[in-house]
Structures are given as C-alpha cells and as structure tokens.
Image: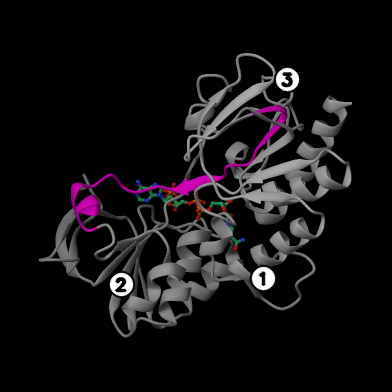
C-alpha cells in the first residue's frame, strides 16, 4: 500500500495553503481535492476581502491562482474523495472513491463544509429543477425571472445581490426581523431596488409542475397576526449556512454538537496525534477564506513539528 508522509484532504484555501507550507518544509505532501475541487470559493461570485487583491476577483479565479502556486512547489494533487478513514493506529489509513488505499504519518483535514438545506420534501423534489444552493452556478438560468433567496447572513446577501444582476426580482426570505450579514452587504441589499426583504418569514413548501413555480410562505408563524400565503417565483436559492464535512472521520475525531472538529485551543491539533484540522471543517465562527488559509499554514507547521 502506498505510504504518504503528509496527507492533505481538501482543496480550499486551507488545504492549498497547507500544501504550500508542507511542500516548502519538505514533507512531500499529497493533496486529495475531494468532492468540490477548489472548495466553496469556486461557487462564490466576487471576492473583495482577500488581501493582495485590490480589485474584486472571482472565487474560481482566486482558487485557480492558489492551485497554481501549489503546483509550482511540485505538490501532487489527486482528484479523489476520501470515503473511509482508520485513525485507530499509526500509520493512519484512508480509502478513496476509486477503492485505492493509502497510509499516512501526518494528516491535515481541510474538507470544508457543505451547504445546508431546509429539509422540506418539495426542496428535494425540485433539487436541480428550481432549487439550488449556489447562485453563481445556477443564477444564469434565471435571467429576467423572479427568484427567492433564503437566509439573512453574508452568503444570502451576496447571493441576492448577485442574482439581482440577472433576475428581474429577488425576494430575500429572512426568518428573523433583522439581517445578520455585515453592514456593507446589508446596505447594498437594502439599497438594491430589485431586492425585497421578507422579514419574519419561513418557507413551508414549494409548489409547481415540473419545476418550482413558487412557495407557500408563513409570516410571523405562531403569532396572532400569522399569515400564510403563496408567492410565485421561478428559482429558490438556499443560503442558510453550511455543515462541516466530517462524517468520514467521525468515529475517531472529536467534533462539537454541530459536527465541527474540535481543536486544542488556538492550535489545529485534534484529539488524534498527527492529525490536524484546518479551515471551515473546524471553524464554526469565522469561516473566511483568509482565516482558512491561515489555519492551513498552522496545520502544516504543526505537521512539520510532529514529523520531526
Ligand atoms: P450564517 O452567517 O450562519 O447565516 C445563516 C443565515 O441563515 C442566518 O440568517 C440564519 O438565520 C439563516 N438560517 C439558518 N437556518 C435557517 C433555517 N432553517 N430557515 C431559515 N433561515 C435559516 O451563514 P453564512 O451567511 O453562510 O455565513 C457563514 C460565515 O461565512 C459567516 O461568518 C460569514 O461572515 C462568512 N461569509 C463572509 C462573506 C464575505 O463576503 N465576507 C461571504 C459569505 C460568507 P438566523 O440569523 O435566524 O440564525
């Protein structure tokens, strides 16, 4: 079986930064890109808060630049997804979606997080037929149409603004009476004439024949002035947060109640020696590309110390 000195799982800013540092430290890292090569930023429209880019840069372009930098240091990048791990003894053992197996001395888990859905039956039914969790990927199909975005955070506001550039009308469905996004995004959303915010509103179901034609919404659920109504729209975009991709490591790695990997204080050390966590998979708080990149750096430095 192939043995890898420093295995990196994931190819977002955390995985790629870990690869750059690990390679420069002669740890011969191998990166497995995972389910979403390039990570969540590949589904982000414009990034304007990653230092060193004074002009907005598209998420895919930013990730491509990071990948190029990783390749420049001769790191091997593989396209497979980790399906199983055995962290019960060293060297640690991993199985991938092509049934290949490797062992590794040090491991950096940078598998990121995946978009959450509301859990409605109709949401499943219309997945890919009007329901999406990625405006950048699917927004194009809604030119001059009406769409709804669910969520009140930075992602929802970013998606609503992106969609407002394509669609004729965007409803932002927010369950609370306020947005939790950063002020700059809130201001942009509120000042965009195409966006209408529906505060204190939840989605009960989606309806339509052969695709989404609208949603049954409830305003102020459980309150005396509760109102249930139907709102026609063609696309329904989820932006209600993410679930960390930790299933594969769960039997071994300690996670919090939401599945985020627990690390030792400010370090990327997990409960298993030689296994480190970086990026959104271990970050329920900040979830920023620059924070993920920094944690990838820390993980590689810890791996170096561990391997020495
Ligand atoms: P988030 O901040 O956790 O916001 C999730 C939103 O979805 C909240 O408004 C939440 O409502 C709502 N929500 C959650 N579950 C829901 C449900 N079942 N039904 C209806 N609404 C629901 O997630 P995020 O917007 O993806 O952001 C995650 C992190 O990434 C944040 O730290 C954010 O700052 C960062 N981010 C930054 C940028 C940037 O440009 N700097 C862009 C994207 C993301 P409640 O408020 O009621 O909980």
> What number is the disc on residue 273?
3
From the top left corner, tell me how far across and down residue 107 is, in percent: 69, 32
- What residue does disc 1 label? 48
Mark 1 within 8 Å of ligand 1, using the beta carbon = yes
Q: Residue at coordinates 60% horizontally, 44% vertically from top-left?
A: 280
Q: Residue at coordinates 70% horizontally, 60% vertically from top-left?
A: 67
Disc 2 residue crowd, few under 14, some 14–19, many 20+, Cα 10 Å: many
Residue 50, quarter of the rendered image: bottom right
Helix or strand or loop: what does disc 3 sit on?
loop
Mark 2 within 8 Å of ligand 1, using the beta carbon = no
- What residue does disc 2 label? 147
Q: Viewed as shown, does residue 150 lie left or right of 79?
A: left
Disc 1 + disc 2, Cβ < 8 Å: no
For the view shown, which residue lies furthest in the left direction? 209
Disc 3 residue crowd, few under 14, some 14–19, many 20+, Cα 10 Å: some
Helix or strand or loop: what does disc 2 sit on?
strand
Disc 2 + disc 3, Cβ < 8 Å: no
In terms of sequence position, does the residue under pointer 1 or pointer 2 come before the other? Answer: 1
- The relative height of residue 199 versus residue 224 in the rendered view (above or below) is below
Along the viewing direction, whichever of 9 and 119 lies nearer the viewer: 9
Is 118 inside the magenta-drawn segment? yes
For the view shown, which residue lies furthest in the front direction? 1
Disc 1 residue crowd, few under 14, some 14–19, many 20+, Cα 10 Å: some
Asked whether residue 258 is in view, the answer is no
- The relative height of residue 161 versus residue 216 in the rendered view (above or below) is below
Task: State how far apart marks 3 and 1 are (Cα).
Answer: 37 Å
How is the structure coloured here? one colour
The magenta segment is: 103-126
From the top left corner, tell me how far across and down residue 308 is, in percent: 89, 26
């Amino acid at each position: 079986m192939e043995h890898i000195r420093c295995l990196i799982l994931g190819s977002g800013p955390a995985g790629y930064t870990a690869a750059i540092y690990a390679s420069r430290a002669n740890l011969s890292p191998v990166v497995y890109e995972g389910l979403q090569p390039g990570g969540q930023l590949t589904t982000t429209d414009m990034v304007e808060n990653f230092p060193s880019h004074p002009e907005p840069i598209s998420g895919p372009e930013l990730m491509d630049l990071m990948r190029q930098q990783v390749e420049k240091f001769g790191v091997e990048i593989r396209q497979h997804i980790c399906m199983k791990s055995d962290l019960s003894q060293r060297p640690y053992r991993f199985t991938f979606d092509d049934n290949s197996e490797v062992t590794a001395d040090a491991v950096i888990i940078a598998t990121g997080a995946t978009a959450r859905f509301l859990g409605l039956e109709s949401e499943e039914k219309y997945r890919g037929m009007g329901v999406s969790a990625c405006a950048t990927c699917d927004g194009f199909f809604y030119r001059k149409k009406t769409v709804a975005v669910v969520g009140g955070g930075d992602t929802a506001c970013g998606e609503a603004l992106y969609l407002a550039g394509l669609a004729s009308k965007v409803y932002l469905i927010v369950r609370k009476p306020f947005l939790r996004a950063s002020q700059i995004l809130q201001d942009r959303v509120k000042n965009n004439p195409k966006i209408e915010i529906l505060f204190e509103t939840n989605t009960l179901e989606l309806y339509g024949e052969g695709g989404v034609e609208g949603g049954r919404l409830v305003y102020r659920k459980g309150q005396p002035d509760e109102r249930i109504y139907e709102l026609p729209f063609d696309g329904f975009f989820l932006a209600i947060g993410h679930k960390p991709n930790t299933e594969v490591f769960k039997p071994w790695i300690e996670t919090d109640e939401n599945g985020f990997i627990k690390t030792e204080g400010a370090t990327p050390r997990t409960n298993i020696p030689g296994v480190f966590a970086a990026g959104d998979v271990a970050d329920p708080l900040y979830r920023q590309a620059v924070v993920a990149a920094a944690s990838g750096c820390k993980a590689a430095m810890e791996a170096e110390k561990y391997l020495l």
